[in-house]
Image (cartoon, rainbow, N blue to C red):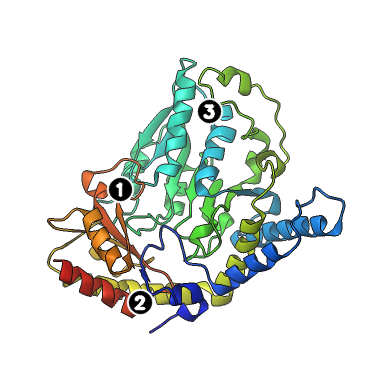
Amino acid sequence: MNGYIDLFTSYKNSGVVFLDSASTTQKPDIVIESAKQHLCNLAVNPGKGNYDPSLKLYNDIENTRRTVAKFINSEENEIIFTSGATESCSIVAHSWGLHNLQDGDEILVCLDDHESTIKPWFYIQKLFAAQSKNIVIKPYNRDKYLGGVDVYSLEKQLTDKTKLIIATHVHNLYGAITDVKSIRNIAGSNIPIFFDVSQSISHLKIDVKDLEVDFMAFSGHKMFALSGIGVLFVKKQFHSVLSHFMMIESSLTSIQHFTNLSQNTELPKVLETGTKNVLGIISLNSAINFILKIGYNGIRSYVSYLTDYLYKKLVDLEFIEFLPGYAFNNSTASYGIISFRVNGYDSRDIADLLSQNKIYVRAGDHCVFKGDNYLKDSIRVSLHIYNTYQDIDRLAECLKQIQ
């Protein structure tokens, strides 16, 4: 079964087996073509010139904003274009956290999650410490077999000082999904939730109203768009308590100065500064249309079949040790991610050997902020709709030869 590979000419003609889609996705022909068309047009700055091409490009950007808003069921002014999920996380920490958290407030995080969602808060903690104030970062756990959020662990950490919960929809290493509604139920309506949907946005329909999240981030390059473009969703009720991000000084001793900056509550302008990544925005519009044309049912069905096929190929290899996730409960929904170790080998050595055979996987620490040692030395295979059963067969055969 070749799935949708014919829609990805560049990948089809590459001769490689790309099994690192959780890191970034290949680009379909429709996205590449839209980028080419933009680059072949007259170069102008969107909305800065009083001439038609500039105004048209500005309208194209705002049309993409409308497309994104409809895509996740939000309002247009709740959509902020960023360089990616990493910047989106940092914006929330600096534009909201720095100006609204108080001494002794607590933030709940999972230290097994991607470091981009966590590191900005430790930096904010340092800024407060420079003023002899304290922000408490409290960890909650994931299930050691299934990889999903241990909601009981999270609930035990909740106090009247909890001011933010940070969660990941689909984990980048385990492929396990978080039921954010269960978090909302135990947290109540007054504690904001920041949700990272980078790994789920190209597999699942995302509806911010249904999820009841307050901040949400994702990257375009993980959903078939070009690199350097991302989206930050900010619920309208938080617009009035946000402050400028790019003009904040970085000195640890300057917190008193920039917390008194006047606030401009007009979003998205307050958080979008300078010339935007127009090419990335154009590609994001095409990528969303591409996903909608195929449909989430088609994506989920095909990737689920591939994931199950991958598991059955790997489980027969006695030297494979699986990480939490699909291998421990393959009756659950799958999102194309299976991680494992090869007993007796360093994961990077295995990845190097696979690379010599033009099979590309991710190995090492996977940008996990802080977890058990086995998280720092594992192999992740992540699939998407351009992969085929033949890709998985080549992987399994190569692993056998290596062993």
- Pointer 2 residue: 305
Crowd around label 3: few <14 · some 14–19 · many ≥20 (10 Å): some
First-in-chain label (2 vs 3): 3
Q: Inspect this view and state whether residue 37 appears.
A: yes
Residue 374, image x and y in percent?
22, 48
Q: Earlier in the sequence, mark 3 or mark 1?
A: 3
User: Marks 1 and 3: in contact by CB < 8 Å?
Assistant: no
- In the rendered image, the residue lying farthest to the right is 50
- For disc 3, the marked residue is 101
Tell me which amino acid carries mark 1: Asp
* Residue 310 place in picture, x, y as percent: 28, 72
Q: Amino acid at mark 2?
A: Tyr
Residue depicted at x 52% and y 65%: 224
| Picture layout, residue 381 above or below residue 155 | below
> Mark 2 or mark 1: which is in front?
1
Decide: few, some or many residues near mark 1? Use Cα within 10 Å; few <14, some 14-19, many ≥20: some
Disc 3 to disc 1, C-alpha distance: 31 Å
Amino acid type, callout 3: Leu
What residue sits right under mark 1 in the picture?
A: 365
Indicate left or right for 267 with 148 as reference: right
Position of the N terminus, as image quadrant, is: bottom left
Along the polypeptide, which appears first: circle 2 or circle 1? 2
Question: At 52% across and 78% down in the image, what residue appears?
Answer: 7
Look at the numbered disc 2 and give the secondary structure of its residue: helix
**Mark in front: 2 vs 3:** 2
